[in-house]
Image (cartoon, rainbow, N blue to C red):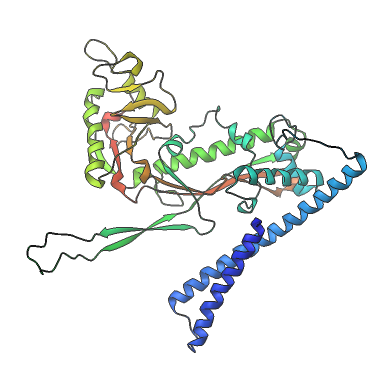
Amino acid sequence: MSYLDKVVERRDAVKAEMDAVLEAVAAENRTDLTAEETEKVDALVAESRSLDEKITKLAAQAEADKRAAEARSAVAEVAMPKASVTITREARTYTPESGNSFVKDAFAAQFNSDFNAQERLARHMREESIERRDVTTANFEGLVVPQYLVDLAAPLARAGRPFLDFAVTKRALPASGMTLNISRMTTGTSTAVQVTQNDAVSETDSDDTLLTVNVRTIAGQQDLSRQSIERGTGIDTFVVADLIRSWHTTLDAQCLNGAGTAGTIKGLRSSGGNAVAFTTTAPTAALLYPKLADAVQQIQSNVFTNPSHWIMHPRRLAFLAAAVDSTGRPLVVPTANTPMNATATGAGVFGYGNSGYTLLGLPIIVDGNVGTTYGTTTTTEDEIYLVDANEMHLWEQPGSPFALRFDATGAGNLTIKTVVYGFAAFTAERYPKAASIISGQGLIAPTF
C-alpha cells in the first residue's frame, strides 16, 4: 500500500469517526453537542482538512511523477536501442560533485517553470523519502535540504548543538498542533501496613496537573540577488549551509538558556533544577569538587534517578584541566597514565561536544552555548549543568530545518528572499529536579 493510499484510508476512518459521533447525537434527538463531542468533532475536522491537503499534494506529485516517467521513457525509446543494463550505483541528485545546484533549481522551478529543474527536485524528494524511510515527502511542506549542505555545517565557527546531540531524549514532533501536553502526578497513591486484619487499608486519592510544552518556530532569512543565484558559484550553498548551522545553534542555545516567554523555548536553566551555589571569590578545582558531588546527590535524593551528563562551557573544562596539586602535578589527566587522586579523567586532548572526559564517572559535554555573562556583580560567570538525559525532552519536526521558500518581495530589485525554518519543542520540567545547576561567583571567567 502506497503512502497516498494510507492517507486516503485514514481520511475515510476520520469521516467514519465523525459520522459516528453525529449519528449518536441524532439518535438521542439532540440538537447540541456536548463539550466533549464538540472537542472531538473539532479535532476530527482539523485532521480531515490536513489530510485533504496532503491528498491533494500527493496526488499532484504522483501525476507529475507519472508525466516525467512517461517523458523519460519516450525519449529513451527513441534515442537508445534496448539493451541489458545493470546499475551498480546511482549518484544522488544533489552532491558537491554532481554539478547540480539545489538552490538554483528551486529558483528555476518556481520562477522560470524549468521542467528539468522540476524533474531534478522531484527525483531529490523521492531519494529523501527512501533515505529517511520513516519520513515521506508528504511530511515536508517545502523542499528537503540536501544532506551534504547540512554536513557542510560542521567545520565552520558555529557553536552547534552539543547538548542536544549528546544529552537529551529526542522525539519526532507531531504533525499538527502548537502545544504538547504531559500529565504530571502531584499527589500520589499510598500504601501502609495493615495493623489489624479487616482494618481499612491505606487510601490516598491521586491528583495530577498538566504540563504544557509550546512548539516554537526558529527561522532565518537572507536576501540574495538574482545574479548571485543564476550566475554565482557556490554562493547559494554557502548561504543555505550557514542558515542551517545558525538554526541548530539557536535551537541548542534556546534549550539551554531560553526563558519560555515572548516566543522563546523554556530551557534547562529556567526550569527549576536543583540550585548548587559556588560562591567563593578565589575559586579552585578543589573547592569546586564538593559542589559537583552535591549536584549528583541532589538529583538522586529528589527524583531517585541517576544523572548522565555534565554540560559546561569549554573554558570551564579548561579551568579543571589547568588545575594542579601542591607539587604542580595536573589533576585532570588521561586514563592511559593510570592517574592517582585525579579530579577528572579522559583520553587525551579534550574535544568540543563529547569531550572524551569524565567527572565523577559521568561524561562531560562541552557546549559553547552555555552562557558566560551571568552573575550580579561580576557578570562574567558561566554555569555547570548536571542532567539526566532521560528527562531532557526534545521534539523536532522530521527534517528540520527542511524548507526553502522563495518570495519575490524584491522583484523590482532582482532580489530573492531565502528562508530556512523549522519547528521544535523542549522541556526539562517533567521532573525539574532531574537536573542540577551549579552557579555563583566561583564560576567567573578563569585565568590561565
Is 15 drawn above or below residue 328 in the view shown?
Answer: below
Q: Where is residue 276 in the image (x, y as percent from the top left)?
A: 24, 38
In the image, farthest residue toward the top: 327
In the image, farthest residue toward the left: 196
For residue 217, side relative to residue 366 (left or right): right
Residue at the spot x=28%, y=34% of the render? 377
For residue 115, side relative to residue 269 (left or right): right
Q: Position of residue 203 (x, y in %)?
A: 18, 66
Q: Position of residue 9 (x, y in %)?
A: 62, 65
Residue at the spot x=49%, y=37% of the render? 249
Q: Is residue 225 visible?
A: no
* Occupied quadrant, residue 288: top left
For residue 30, side relative to residue 272 (left or right): right
Q: In which quadrant will I find the C terminus?
A: top left
Residue at the spot x=70%, y=39% of the render? 102
* Occupied quadrant, residue 316: top left
In the image, farthest residue toward the front: 84
Q: In which quadrant will I find the N terminus?
A: bottom right
Task: Count the marks.
Answer: 0
Residue at the spot x=19%, y=60% of the render? 190
Q: Where is residue 111 in the image (x, y as percent from the top left)?
A: 77, 48
Q: Nearer the viewer, residue 427 or 313?
A: 427
Is 332 drawn above or below residue 217 in the view shown?
Answer: above
Q: Which of 379 and 106 is in front in this view?
A: 106
In the image, farthest residue toward the right: 78
Q: Is residue 381 visible?
A: yes
